[in-house]
Structures are given as structure tokens and as C-alpha cells.
Image (cartoon, rainbow, N blue to C red):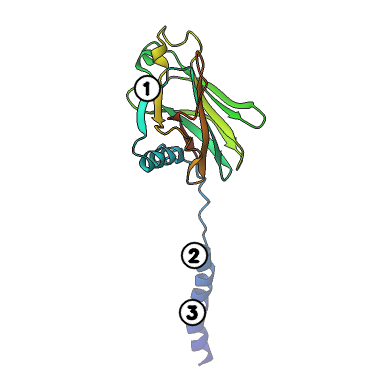
Amino acid sequence: MKKILIKIGLPIVLLVAATLIVGPSCGSTVPDPVATTPTCTTTNTLFQQVFAATATANPSFQDVSTMDLLTHQYTFTVNANKTICSIGYQGNATLFANNLPYTIEIVDTTTNAVIYTGNHLFGSTATSYVSITPVNLIANQSYTIRRTLPAGGYGGNIGNTIGRILRFTSSSSVFPVTSGGFTITGSNFYGTGGPVVNFGIPYIDIVFQ
């Protein structure tokens, strides 16, 4: 009787042992973490939200191409640390055809230090985007973004310096305007004339990662 128990019990013991060895090994396998790359989507950016909300709040404001001055700029803050990965703008057809770029600059307004500068061509039929070297912003710090054409860099026609703007029609400033923690605190237009302060919001889109 003892011999029978040994013959039957041994295979069962071996099977249980194999299950304990193989089971945990398969069941506890954890996949390697997948590295994620920050996205840089140009859809429904915080700037677009502010621009649209401001236009909706006052239907008399005009979304137009105007202001024949070399520099269009606005000053802004963010309520959390953010990284800019792309800039969007709708350029002038003549400038694009003649390969005349805009200079895009981002300035720390506290120190007046230029933290980004680059020369870029933008398409004229719609807002087009250029990727830039990532620019890190600090929460609640004031920054200015501007697009500039150098004197003589607009094809000999000052009319080529106009750009898309949400033009205010009220005499008093509507700034600050905000959405999603992105706040525009003021704007300015100058060069060969001006300055024209708080005339409207120039459409210079900022894309965050």
C-alpha cells in the first residue's frame, strides 16, 4: 500500500512544483516602460482659446489683417511652468514668394533678455507652424513674443508688414484676457511709426508641449 501511494504521489508533487515555478514566472512579467515623447499639437492651443474667447466676448472686435508696422507683439504669462515647441503665424504672400522671413523673438520682460530668436518663413493662405528649439517658461513670469520685419525686408512695400490681428473697437484696453492659465496682458505695434499700444491681439500662436 505504501508503494502505491509513492507512485501516485510523486507525479502530483512534481506537477505542483512545476506549476509554482512556471506560474509566477509568467504571471509576474512586467513590460518595459515605454518612453513617451511630448506632443506638440497645433489644435486648440491656449493662444487660440484666448483669441477666440476675446472675440466672442465682444462681437464688435474685428479679426482682420492690418497695422503696417514692422513689429507686432504681445506680452503674456502662464500659470504653470511650460515649454514652447512651435510657433504659428500667417505670413504675407509677397514676403513668402520672395523668401523674406520674419524674425520671431521671445523676451523675458523682467530682464529684457531674448530667450529665443529665429528667422522663419510662414505660408500666406493660413496659419502655418515652425518647430523651434524648446523654450522653457516659468510660471507667472512675464514674457513678450514678437514678429519683426527688418527695415527694407518687406519688398519695398510697407503694406507687406500688415498681419492678422483681433482689432479692438473700444477706446479702453480690454487686457488682461485669459483662458486655461494663459494670460495676455498687453500688446504693441511699432517700427517706421508707432508705438500703437493695446490696439488688439496679433495672431502669433504659441504651441506648448
Q: Is residue 9 left or right of residue 89?
A: right
Residue 71 horizontal/vertical position (percent): 50, 20
Q: Nearer the viewer, mark 1 or mark 2?
A: 1
Which type of secondary structure does the marked residue at label 2 adopt?
helix
Label 2 near label 1: C-beta < 8 Å? no
* SS class, disc 3: helix
Say which amino acid is labelled 2. Answer: Gly
> Would you place residue 190 above or below residue 22 in this image?
above
* Figure label count: 3
- Check contact, mark 1 vs mark 3: CB within 8 A: no
Q: Dot 2, crowdedness within 10 Å: few (<14), some or many (≥20)?
A: few
Instruction: Please report the residue visible at 37 percent of the width from the left and 34 percent of the height from the top.
Output: 61
Residue marked by disc 3: 12
Q: Which residue is mark 1?
A: 123
Type of amino acid at the residue the image marks with label 3: Ile
User: Closer to the camera, 14 or 166?
Assistant: 166
Q: Amino acid at mark 1?
A: Gly
Quadrant of the image occupied by residue 46: top left
Tag nearer the camera, 1 or 3: 1
CA gap between label 2 and label 3 equals 22 Å
The image shows residue 199 at horizontal and vertical percentages of 46, 28
Residue pointed to by mark 2: 27
